[in-house]
Image (cartoon, grey):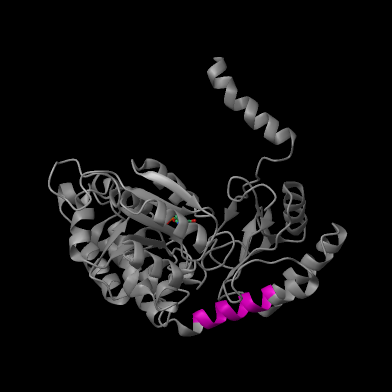
């Protein structure tokens, strides 16, 4: 075998020897429910992002089945090449209305929404023309714990990059002042995916106004869960009119697949539709899935009781874990509940012990979080019962004491 191929085998072998290679369970049957089957045995899950339980919703499933009958199971080509379907336009119009913005654009994943849009907000335009700030690439200012898809999307850009300390507004202002004369883009997770805390959006939009910077908020975990009708964190904090681009994923509260961005002006969406490469060169969300997403949006708008239940479950789990002595991050009622364990070994052993007790709760470690920040990432759903959460808590306490973490 070529040495260049042996390289990978060596890495996998070393990870497996050190018991660091992640185990991926094969789940049979639906995986959206709090109880799943692995090798014929039932497990309780606390690792799904299906916050409102919509991935198992029958009305959405019916809408997708009707969509399959009408549109088939493939989209054939990209929207630029073969024309855009009525159902894609309908979803985008409905999202724009819901989010109170000029327009929205959908992508076949949230990752691809970030990959396509972020760079085009700061890269130079290929044709020479008189433009404010000239034809130069701008600068991206990104929170240090932003999601991996943002980090990679920023790397695709030709802009300069600056990383500011997590939610540190003084550090952000220092960088804004340093780059005063350039086009600037501030990028942040809305709800941080691993920590469950909120970006300081009120200060960010204020600074963006003062320094003439664009603001891009990846609200994948806030969409559907926060805001008066599930619009997300920007509405929850009352800053939605001042955020230039809100991005969301349909893989969390929306219970499906795909991603979207909103734009406050139609100029910006028209520009992105002809420049974002993951929109131009990649097929859109399957039309049958889009039909399901239109139903999902309706359920989210009318989803007050689901939102209440998710938040109630999250508050209960978080406050009980803290009472036991765990160090838990995140906003009180956010369904991302991460008890810190501070070592890769502790995180893996803890997760294995929970698995032995019939509970799925993944260990989170590099590259998802920095060294020393290892944790479990527990998530609560609207569909968890109090009894199921109590069973998790009972085991968290027992294992936490055994491992001398609490
Ligand atoms: C903050 C954040 N942004 C983007 C994504 C990517 O979303 P998708 O699963 O739709 O590709 C995720 C998914 O984990 C996320 O947590």
Frontmost residue, 30 versus 234: 234
The residue closer to the viewer here, 226 or 6, is 226
Give the percent coordinates (x, y) of residue 257: 40, 59
Q: Main secondary structure of the magenta part?
A: helix
Figure quadrant of the N terminus? top right
Q: Is residue 111 visible?
A: no
Question: From the viewer's perspective, is 364 left or right of 78?
Answer: right
Residue 361, quarter of picture: bottom right
Q: Residue at x 35, y 43 (%)?
A: 157
- Relative placement, left or right, of 152 versus 38 is left
Query: Where's the C terminus, which quadrant?
Result: bottom right
Position of 187 compared to 278: left or right? right
Please check the rendered image and state whether residue 310 is part of the magenta-colored stretch, yes or no: yes
- Give the camera-side residue of 92 and 375: 375
Q: Which residue is drawn at 47% across and 67% down?
A: 55
* Extent of the magenta region: 306-318
Find residue 381 and report its horizontal and vertical position in percent.
57, 72
């Amino acid at each position: 075998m070529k040495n260049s191929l042996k390289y990978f085998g060596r890495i996998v072998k070393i990870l497996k020897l050190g018991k660091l290679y992640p185990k991926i369970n094969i789940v049979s049957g639906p995986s959206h429910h709090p109880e799943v089957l692995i090798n014929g045995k039932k497990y309780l899950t606390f690792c799904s992002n299906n916050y409102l339980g919509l991935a198992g919703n029958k009305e959405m499933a019916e809408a997708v089945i009707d969509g399959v009958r009408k549109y088939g199971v493939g989209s054939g080509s990209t929207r630029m090449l073969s024309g855009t379907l009525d159902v894609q336009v309908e979803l985008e119009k409905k999202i724009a209305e819901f989010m109170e913005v000029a327009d929205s654009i959908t992508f076949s994943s949230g990752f691809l929404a970030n990959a396509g849009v972020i760079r085009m907000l700061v890269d130079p335009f290929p044709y020479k023309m008189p433009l404010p700030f000239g034809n130069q690439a701008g600068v991206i200012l990104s929170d240090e714990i932003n999601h991996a898809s943002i980090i990679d999307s920023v790397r695709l850009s030709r802009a300069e990059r600056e990383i500011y300390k997590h939610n540190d507004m003084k550090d952000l202002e220092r960088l804004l002042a340093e780059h005063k004369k350039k086009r600037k883009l501030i990028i942040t997770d809305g709800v941080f995916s691993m920590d469950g805390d909120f970006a300081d959006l009120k200060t960010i939009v204020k600074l963006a106004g003062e320094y003439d910077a664009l603001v891009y908020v990846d609200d994948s975990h806030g969409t559907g869960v926060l805001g008066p009708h599930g619009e997300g964190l920007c509405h929850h904090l009352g800053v939605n009119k001042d955020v230039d681009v809100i991005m969301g994923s349909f893989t969390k509260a929306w219970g499906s697949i795909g991603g979207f961005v909103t734009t406050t002006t139609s100029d910006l969406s028209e520009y992105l539709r002809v420049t974002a490469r993951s929109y131009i060169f990649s097929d859109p969300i399957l039309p049958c899935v889009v039909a399901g997403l239109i139903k999902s949006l309706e359920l989210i708008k009318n989803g007050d009781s689901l939102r209440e239940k998710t938040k109630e479950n999250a508050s209960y789990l978080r406050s009980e874990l803290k009472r036991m002595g765990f160090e838990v991050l995140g906003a009180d009622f956010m369904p991302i509940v991460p008890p810190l364990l501070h070592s890769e070994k502790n995180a893996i052993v803890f997760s294995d012990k929970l698995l032995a007790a019939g509970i799925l709760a993944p260990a989170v470690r590099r590259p998802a979080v920095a060294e020393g920040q290892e944790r479990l990432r527990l998530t609560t759903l609207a569909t968890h019962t109090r009894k199921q959460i109590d069973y998790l808590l009972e085991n968290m306490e027992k294992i936490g004491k055994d491992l001398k973490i609490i």
